[in-house]
């Protein structure tokens, strides 16, 4: 496993306004990778065509949108290209493969766009996919605040190459929240899971490995959607769940495929004595307080978090390892309402191997820090929905 830590150090610089001859292209809405691959190229640079698209996050997701960047090799590549150690960027923008993007209210005058800055890259980006024929990158964008939002995409010459908009009709509360946290040191002991359920948390959305592709096609391979043999149409990695279902590699034939409707889900969630157990065929990052999200129902009614902020304590020196099973000590969140014996509680979890982030509306980010890894599961993984009746023994588990 190779890790790359990229930190932002910002310095002001001049910016260049786009000319009429170089008007940014529109970012279309796409429904499948098949459609995205056939679009006209938005930009061609470094022997690659770049195509962009906005997409719905899937019917099991929350109030966010997905921005896709697809690159296709159009000429034999030269030597593997590294990102320059002093790379032009736009303040408040975020990296997505070879481009950067930012989100702001639609109609903002160009003079109010963030100024151009330069970002110091401490280490080179991984070149594992440098010679792939195609790569697909994806990023999540908050869509929980009412209004029309504009997505602007830049390449390295500071000029916007594409713009797209989406409209949010009403403020929306996201049902997904952080699921777990480390057990307090005073309560640790033999036989007790180190991780416990968070009883207070705010809304969150999954992050994606924006500097590493979520899907790629090697040189010489033919594009073959994984579900084509089943006669299904459409394939778009990163959705929850992906159109057409998760790829077979997420199951490996070792776990029984639990389904929502016709979609097989790669995680198996169970309640075993005093803990929730999440099992997966592919490795998960063993940072459940960072990577596990959950949503809850009480008697079939969705519950949303009432927290406005989330306490954030990062242990920078933590050891990074993978696991195929995560145990979380049983507890019930504070905001499930008044529970009694016999109340039916339903839980579903999501594993985000590229961590998650608070969903607090659009916000400019002046510093950029991303952890890049090479896990077999770069996209969020969904579990089955687990329903259990509340017992008398469970009630004291609430604070």
Image (tube, rainbow, N blue to C red):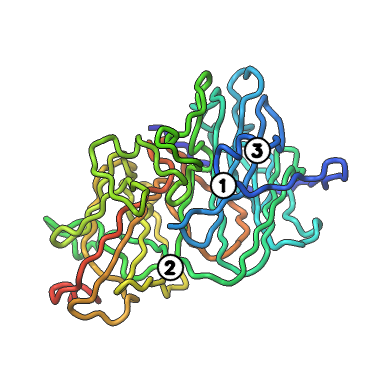
Q: Nearer the viewer, residue 156 or 62?
A: 62
Dots 2, 1 in contact, CB < 8 A: no
Who's the residue at 60% across and 39% down the image? Answer: 35
Q: Which residue is mark 2?
A: 202
Q: Earlier in the sequence, mark 3 or mark 1?
A: 1
Secondary element at image label 2: loop
Which is more toward the observer, 4 or 273?
A: 273
Q: Using the image, determine if residue 297 lies above or below residue 139.
A: below
**Front-most of residues 308 and 341:** 341
Q: From the viewer's perspective, is the residue at label 3 or at label 2 nearer?
A: 3
**In the picture shown, does residue 165 fall above or below 132?**
below
Asked whether the residues under the numbered discs 3 and 2 touch, taking CB atoms below 8 Å apart as contact, a structural biologist would say no
Secondary structure beneath dot 3 equals strand
- Picture quadrant of residue 106: bottom right
The dot on residue 51 is 3
- Circles 3 and 1: CB atoms closer than 8 Å: no
């Amino acid at each position: 496993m190779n890790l790359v830590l990229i930190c932002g150090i910002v310095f002001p610089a001049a910016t260049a306004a786009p000319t009429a001859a170089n008007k940014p292209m529109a970012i279309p809405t796409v429904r499948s990778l098949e459609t995205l691959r056939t679009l006209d190229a938005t930009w061609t640079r470094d022997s690659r065509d770049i195509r962009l698209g906005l997409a719905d996050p899937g019917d099991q997701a929350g109030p966010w949108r997905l921005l896709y960047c697809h690159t296709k090799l159009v000429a034999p590549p030269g030597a593997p290209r590294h990102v320059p150690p002093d790379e032009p960027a736009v303040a408040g923008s975020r990296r997505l493969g070879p481009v950067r993007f930012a989100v702001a209210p639609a109609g903002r005058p160009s003079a109010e766009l963030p100024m151009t800055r330069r970002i110091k890259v401490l280490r080179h980006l991984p070149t594992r996919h440098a010679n792939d024929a195609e790569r697909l990158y994806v990023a999540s964008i908050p869509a929980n605040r009412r209004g029309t939002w504009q997505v602007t995409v830049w390449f390295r010459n500071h000029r916007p190459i594409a713009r797209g908009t989406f409209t949010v009709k009403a403020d929306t509360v996201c049902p997904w929240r952080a699921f777990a946290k480390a057990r307090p040191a005073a309560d640790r002991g033999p036989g007790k899971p180190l991780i416990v359920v968070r009883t207070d948390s705010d809304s969150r959305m999954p992050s994606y490995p924006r500097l590493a592709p979520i899907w790629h096609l090697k040189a010489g391979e033919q594009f073959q959607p994984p579900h084509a043999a089943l006669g299904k149409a459409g394939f778009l990695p990163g959705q929850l769940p992906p159109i057409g279902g998760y790829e077979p590699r997420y199951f490996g034939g070792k776990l029984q495929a639990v389904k929502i409707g016709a979609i097989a889900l790669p995680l198996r969630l169970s309640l075993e004595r005093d803990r929730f157990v999440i099992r997966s065929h592919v490795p998960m990052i063993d940072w459940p307080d960072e990577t596990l999200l959950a949503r809850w129902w009480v008697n079939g009614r969705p519950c949303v978090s009432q927290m406005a902020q989330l306490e954030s304590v990062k242990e920078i020196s933590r050891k990074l390892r993978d696991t195929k099973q995560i145990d979380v000590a049983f507890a019930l969140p504070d905001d499930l309402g008044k529970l009694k014996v016999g109340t039916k509680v339903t839980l579903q979890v999501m594993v985000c191997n590229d961590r998650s982030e608070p969903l607090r509306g659009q916000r400019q980010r002046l510093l950029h820090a991303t952890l890049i890894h090479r896990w077999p599961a770069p996209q969020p993984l969904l579990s089955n929905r687990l329903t259990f009746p509340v017992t008398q023994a469970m009630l004291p588990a609430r604070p």
